[in-house]
Image (tube, helix red, strand yellow):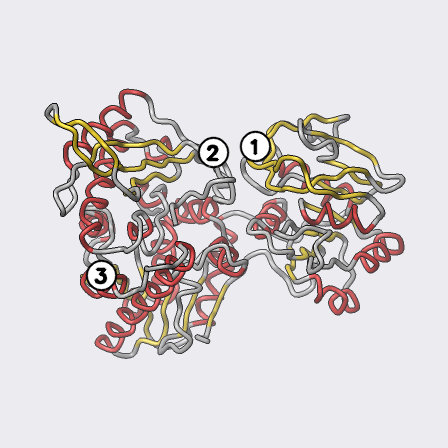
Amino acid sequence: MPVHHRFYSGTREYAQVVILECGSKSTPLIAGVCRDAGVCTRTMAPADFEHYAAASIPKAVFVSGGPDSVYDFAALQIPYGLLMYLNHNHGTAIFGICYGAQALAHAAGGKVKKASFAEVGTHMLKMKHVIGGYLGGPVVMNHSDEIASLPFGWERWGSTERSAYALFGTDNILCTLFHPEMGDTQDGEKLIAHFLYSLARCRQDHTTGPEAFVADAIPFISDAAPEGGMVVGVSGGVDSAVTLELCRQVLGRERVYGIHVDNGFLCEGETEEVRRLLGEDGMIYEDAARLFWRTCERINWRNRHEKDYFSELRQKVGERFISVFEKRARRIGGIRYLGQGTNFSDIQETNTGLVRHHNVGGLPDRMELEVVEPLAGLHKFEIREVAEYLGLDQEIVWRQPSPGPANSLRMWPPVTRAKASPVARANRILEEEVRRYYPDPRDRPSQYYAALISGRMAGIVGDKEVYGYAILVRAVKRNPRESYASAEPFSFPDDLWRTIDTRIRAEVVLQDGMPIVAVCWHGTGKPPARIECH
């Protein structure tokens, strides 16, 4: 495996708060909320907790969500006996979330069963009484099991329409079937802060904010790259731009080169825009479109599930990026490090098997360069705060995220160069119209794109029936924490939608000459839908 240097802000070897990782993609958000509240954390697998607790007794333990059901034979086991021992003898407070709540209730003698209907998305929580200033409201659910009865002596504190026991517990044990760590849960951070300071009696041991982060990141970067040069992969997004600026400030511009790679699947005009925003000084622009087209077109797509196909595509794209970076590094000479804007969500989603991000799961086993990732412990909204603090251009600060494979994830298999141009054009039209309608980037959707839908459908052109393709338009709202673990759909005003629809149908044509006969709207939140198509 490549040598990795990852900076996790707000973590400690022996922390007041331990997070037991049960497989939820949103587990890092728990650490993020704790960090914002001023408390450091340590995340580990449940199986490692006994060894840890023998050396350090935490004041609080979170048991995270996860994909298992407590009644499954192979369900992940939590250290219930040890947790109760710490709770009874040392006052350790316990917070179970989703699967963690079900596992605690089940182990304590409550009953968990398969729900008649899965509870997914945003639902309203009604409280029996206020808990530490938390009043309930919209909460994010993502489970198919329910609590049928509570353990003896436990209390119900809040319910939704489908979950009688959505918020419950006893003394300093708190359990939620919903996800308080997700940005679309209203005031979830208040509930977590109440748990930390009132139930667990933690003390503040972390200073949050961009100034404190930069101060901590400076020695990390200096220690990770003490000598030799660095290339930083730069997409033009906020993650990579912040990484480039941080490394330049710490190591000096003469040691750091930014590399922007056109992988053949970018939106139309994207490289030109990156040139305008980042300039030429210290930047290298590589046109590797043909290399990436050949790579993607060689991936076998017949008789394969889309998940497997696109997982391999992400891996191959990641490997090609590394080959481009290493080739350029050899030409420059003296380069020892690769800087990446990898964030907390990239790592977590790859580690839990949700998505194989190209910059995490796509790295080859052997690399010539050591990888430096100063943003590995931050979420997108925190990275934007750092970008503001560093004085980056507002278009970079608020630039919407885009996956490394770019528009190759916005078409059906097989991914080919013939589909790249029309999808690139459709996304340029969408970008132009959104920017025209919302001049302030903070007013725009958090993420938006156009994708080519599989298959053809009937339409009418010039009084004749024709068959053509359809374009799917997707946009999601920005929430304060911008974690992308959950997202609500963003609806365009009618006049903006009509313009987007008209321009895409008029200006986008596939290479086979087939027209676009429909522009469709994707209006489902996450969960249950994903933000990207693949």
**Residue that label 2 marks:** 488
Question: Which residue lies at the image location 49% right of the left edge and 45% below the top edge?
Answer: 483
Q: Residues within 10 Å of mark 3 (few under 14, many from 20)?
A: many
Whichever of labels 2 and 1 marks the residue nearer the N terminus, that label is 1
Give x and y (percent) for residue 289: 20, 60
Q: Is residue 488 left or right of residue 430?
A: right
Report the disc number at residue 122.
1
Question: Which residue lies at the image location 84% right of the left edge and 57% below the top edge?
Answer: 86
Question: Which residue lies at the image location 57% right of the left edge and 37% below the top edge?
Answer: 120
For the residue pair 437 and 502, the one nearer the viewer reads as: 502
Rounded to the nearest angstrom, the CA distance separating label 3 from label 2 is: 33 Å
| Amino acid at pointer 2 | Glu
Rounded to the nearest angstrom, the CA distance separating label 2 from label 1 is: 9 Å
Q: Is residue 92 left or right of residue 136?
A: right
Tag 3's secondary structure? helix
Tag 1's secondary structure? strand
